[in-house]
Image (cartoon, rainbow, N blue to C red):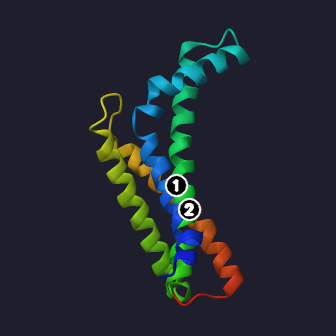
Amino acid sequence: MNSRRFFKYWLPALIWMSVIFLGSTNVLSEPNTSRFIVPFLHWLNPHISFEAVDMINMACRKFGHVSEYAILAALLWRALRAETHWHARLSILFAATLLACAAFAAGDEFHQSFVPTRTPSLRDVLIDIGGALVALMICAIFAQRKSGPERI
């Protein structure tokens, strides 16, 4: 692999993986993100209940999991598709990318077990995989439309 291809295809995925890793430190822990989300919700609606704030805060945090792993899956799909001959077999590319995202999600949650303000969660790994799965289905649909019927 030459350096131009690395910078074009793999570097964006590696940078995004670093962003996810940084997010699993104290930087994006629940107490830190709540300092922004809760005041914003109270600014929108001063009479909002604590339960509603808690539910919205949790939904925002879980949507963060979905979106960050959807982006990771799309970036890995792009890199793997450019570097391999798997584009002829989308099912192999799909499975390899999903497996890579699942492994990174599990590793990320394991990393959180060492961060005092974070709690590892199997549910978060499943949410991450769900985000990756959504992005991969979109990638596969576009790839199949572009290249015609796939050999499964």
Residue ID at (58%, 67%): 137
* Contact? badges 2 and 1 (CB < 8 Å): yes
Question: Where residue 108 sits in the image (x, y, percent)?
Answer: 36, 48
The residue carrying pointer 1 sits among few (fewer than 14), some (14 to 19) or many (20 or more) residues within 10 Å by Cα, namely some
In the image, which disc is placed on residue 12?
2
Query: Callout 2 environment at 10 Å: few (<14), some (14 to 19), or many (20+)?
Result: some
Depth order, front residue of 23/126: 23
Mark 2 vs mark 1, CA separation in Å: 6 Å
Q: Residue at x 66, y 20 (%)?
A: 40
Tag 1 residue = 16
Q: Nearer the viewer, residue 14 or 140?
A: 14
Residue 129 percent location from the top left of the image: 45, 56
Q: What residue is drawn where x is 51% and y is 88%?
A: 85
Left or right of 65, for residue 52: right
Q: Secondary structure at mark 1?
A: helix
Q: Residue furthest left?
A: 114
Quarter of image, res 114: top left
Would you identify the image quadrant in which residue 123 lies? top left
User: Which structural element holds mark 2?
Assistant: helix
Residue 55 in sight in this render: yes
Name which residue lies at 34% across and 53% down: 106
Kind of residue indicated by mark 1? Trp
- Residue sitting at the far top: 47
